[in-house]
Amino acid sequence: SFINSENASIKNMVIEGNDLNNIFSGGCRVAGVYMMLSKNIKVSNMTITNFNGDGISYQQCIDIKIYSNNIITNKGNGIHPGSGSVESIIEKNNIKDNIKDGIFFCLRVSCCTVNDNNISNNKNNGISIGHKDIKLHINNNKLSFNKVNGILFRDEKICGEKSIIENNIFEKNNIKITSKITNIIIKNNIGCDINISTDITFDAGHTSYVPDLDDKHLDI
């Protein structure tokens, strides 16, 4: 866990959750890799599997990078950004076979980029967006065979405002909108039957991960 931490990383490890011998734990307080009140943390090249809860969770954090991990067969969500976390990047991960959502945006998450991930066969939604989760850029992902929806906009307040969903591939799942959404762009996706544009221009997401530049302080 990273609590009140800055400028750190965890990488190149396997975390085996031993779910059969542990009780279920909610992702707001614990996960296979858990971050709270932390800044500039990178999680990369990890395999996180069979945890009886969420694979990765970060709460009240700034500038989290989740890059090139296998997050599979956990009993909660794959990745759980929440509690006002800002400016994070979820990129090039394999997020599959988790019991809940692949990525669950919980509460007041903003300026997050979700790019070039394989999000497949999760037992609920591929990506779930909810209460005051804004300025998300969901781009160039493959969302396939998730059991409920590829992407769900939950029936919650200010759900997904100023987000852009583009250039994704949907296979055997789709986008479902259950809330009154405003100022959202959904365009250029394959296998998706929803297209939305707006006259308002806006930026969404956070700067994509640049391997050498972003790793200068993470030589551990």
Image (cartoon, helix red, strand yellow):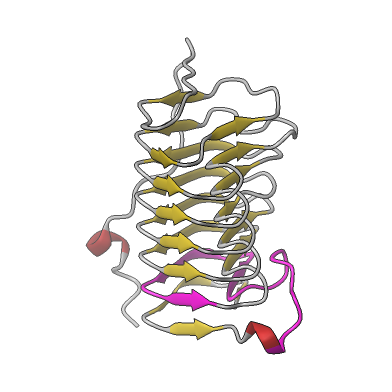
Instruction: Please state which of residues 162 and 38 is positioned toward the viewer in this rendering.
Output: 162
Instruction: Please state which of residues 17 and 171 is positioned toward the viewer in this rendering.
Output: 171
Instruction: Please state which of residues 173 and 177 is positioned toward the viewer in this rendering.
Output: 173
Q: Which corner quadrant holds the N terminus?
A: bottom right
Residue 146 vertical placement versus 64 (above, below): above
Which x, y percent locates residue 7?
Answer: 45, 70
Q: Which corner quadrant holds the C terminus?
A: bottom left
Residue at horizontal 68%, vertical 73%? 30
Residue at horizontal 46%, vertical 31%? 164
Which x, y percent locates residue 27?
Answer: 69, 66
Q: Hey, which quadrant is residue 201 in on the image?
A: top left
Residue 197 vertical placement versus 212 (above, below): above
Residue at horizontal 47%, vertical 24%? 193
Residue 83 vertical placement versus 78 (above, below): above
Residue furthest to the left: 212
In the image, which residues are magenta?
A: 21-49
Taking the magenta stretch, the answer to whether it contains residue 146 is no
